[in-house]
Image (cartoon, rainbow, N blue to C red):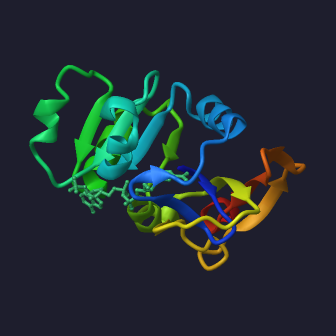
Amino acid sequence: MTAIACVDKNNGIGKDGKLLISIPDDMKFFRGNTKDSIVVMGRKTLFSFKDKAPLKNRINIVFTRNDELKNEYKQFDNIFFVKNEDELNEIIEKYKDKKVFLIGGAKIYNDLIDKCDTCLITKLDTSFDADTFFPDLEKHGFTIETISETYTYEDIKYQFIKYKGPLKRK
Ligand SMILES: NC(=O)c1ccc[n+]([C@@H]2O[C@H](COP(=O)([O-])OP(=O)(O)OC[C@H]3O[C@@H](n4cnc5c(N)ncnc54)[C@H](OP(=O)(O)O)[C@@H]3O)[C@@H](O)[C@H]2O)c1
């Protein structure tokens, strides 16, 4: 599984249920990587999307303890709701040919980071006022594999960093 996230200087990822910033080239990077794949997320991240709709051209798997959501989303054929990792794995098994991306938010990144072998991080050089944070990758045994040149959006500098984790090195 690959985690994909945009993090600020202090690993902040969100505030009041929203992203800190939306950088067009980062959105393009996210779409390009996750297209036709499985995306795994928490319910709050699902609710942060436009119209709370699942992402198109992707299998959306959403962690929630709310049993009613299944019914509320029954018009969509590309969304599943799970309560635990066993249920998650059951669905992933059915789509063996598809890549799996962990797309947030903070709760889900922190719970599942040790199941990831790769992280694709868009690292901003700016500090935002954040209330949710990505885990410390060094503490989880990740090391940098590749790092892009520095890009600029408005006055924000950022880089695309690919990390590999202990699972990948085994
Ligand atoms: N910068 C980025 O790349 C990025 C990416 C994604 C999200 N974000 C941001 O992150 C923030 C949201 O993160 P968050 O941590 O508040 O929420 P989250 O991880 O998106 O969702 C948390 C919800 O997931 C469900 N959940 C979590 N653990 C569960 C478990 N073990 N079993 C069953 N359900 C479980 C619960 O849903 P119920 O309450 O329904 O039970 C919980 O309220 C937003 O600000 C968002 O914009 C940023």
Q: Please say whether residue 115 is visible from this viewpoint.
A: no
Q: Is residue 148 left or right of residue 102?
A: right
Q: Position of residue 18 (x, y in %)?
A: 44, 50
Q: Position of residue 83 (x, y in %)?
A: 21, 54
Front residue (pair 66, 18) = 18
Q: Please say whether residue 72 is visible from this viewpoint.
A: yes
Front residue (pair 54, 90) = 54
Q: Residue furthest front?
A: 155
- Residue at image x 9%, y 41%? 68
Q: In this picture, is 155 found above or below 95?
A: below
Q: Position of residue 81 (x, y in %)?
A: 24, 42
- Residue at image x 60%, y 57%? 117
Q: In this picture, is 93 found above or below 114?
A: above
Which quarter shows the C terminus?
bottom right
Q: Is residue 128 left or right of residue 77?
A: right
- Residue at image x 17%, y 55%? 65
Front residue (pair 15, 89) = 15
Front residue (pair 119, 99) = 119
How many labels sit on residues? Answer: 0
Q: Position of residue 45 (x, y in %)?
A: 38, 48
| Quarter where residue 26 is shown | top right
- Residue at image x 78%, y 53%? 158
Q: Is residue 167 left or right of residue 130?
A: right
